[in-house]
Image (tube, grey):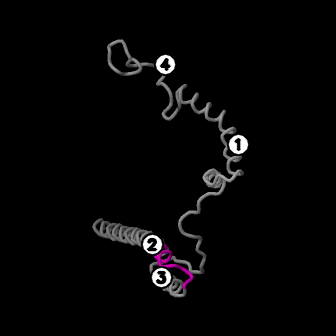
């Protein structure tokens, strides 16, 4: 507390420091973590021994540590043509529909790929719109310069 009784940690215009960095731990947190680390090996050894003796919950706990849970979905590999323009989108979507119809992709996987293509379509459209706007702007600028040139003659 500062001398004027408010709840700030430092006095106004403090030039000596701003305290701990955000997210840094205090001494109590560090001590608790160290105590946990000191005991971690013995706890792990106890769990291993318990699992070896047939304790299923200990075995499941240990397996969950060493074998990560699979991410939802699966890796999907299929061939597709490159999508460079909006005109390439429809053929790509047809290919995805064929993959779903043939059973190579599930309906959910097909929907995810469609979403991916949709995001790509939006990017292509925005890029094309920016290009067209720049072309129109350049044309207007050129026409304006031509008209200004005629007025000066």
Work out whether residue 26 or residue 19 is closer to the camera in this orientation and state it. Answer: 26
User: In the image, residue 14 lies at what x, y percent?
Assistant: 43, 19
Q: Residue at x 72, y 51 (%)?
A: 52
Q: Residue at x 50, y 31 (%)?
A: 21
Circles 2 and 4: CB atoms closer than 8 Å: no
Distance from the alpha carbon under mark 2 to that under mark 3: 10 Å
Residue 129 numbered mark, or none: none
Residue 115 numbered mark, or none: 2
Q: Nearer the viewer, mark 2 or mark 4?
A: 2
User: In the image, residue 96 lies at what x, y percent?
Assistant: 51, 82
Q: Residue at x 60, y 80 (%)?
A: 79
Q: Quarter of the image for the N terminus: give it.
A: top left
**Residue 106 is inside the magenta segment:** yes
| Mark sitting earlier along the chain (2/3) | 3
User: In the image, residue 16 lies at what x, y percent?
Assistant: 49, 18
Q: Secondary structure at mark 4?
A: loop
Q: Which residue is mark 3?
A: 93
Q: Secondary structure at mark 2?
A: helix
Q: Which residues are magenta?
A: 103-112
């Amino acid at each position: 507390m500062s001398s004027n009784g408010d709840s700030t940690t430092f006095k106004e215009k403090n030039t000596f420091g701003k305290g701990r960095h955000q997210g840094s731990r205090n001494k109590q947190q560090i001590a608790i973590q160290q105590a946990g680390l000191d005991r971690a090996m013995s706890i792990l050894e106890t769990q291993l021994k318990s699992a070896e003796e047939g304790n299923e919950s200990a075995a499941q706990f240990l397996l969950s540590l060493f074998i990560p849970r699979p991410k939802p979905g699966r890796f999907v590999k299929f061939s597709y043509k490159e999508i460079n323009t909006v005109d390439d989108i429809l053929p790509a979507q047809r290919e995805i529909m064929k993959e779903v119809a043939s059973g190579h992709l599930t309906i959910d996987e097909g929907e995810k790929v469609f979403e991916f293509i949709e995001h790509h379509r939006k990017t292509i459209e925005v890029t094309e719109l920016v290009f067209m706007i720049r072309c129109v702007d350049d044309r207007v600028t050129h026409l304006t310069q031509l008209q200004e040139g005629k007025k000066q003659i």
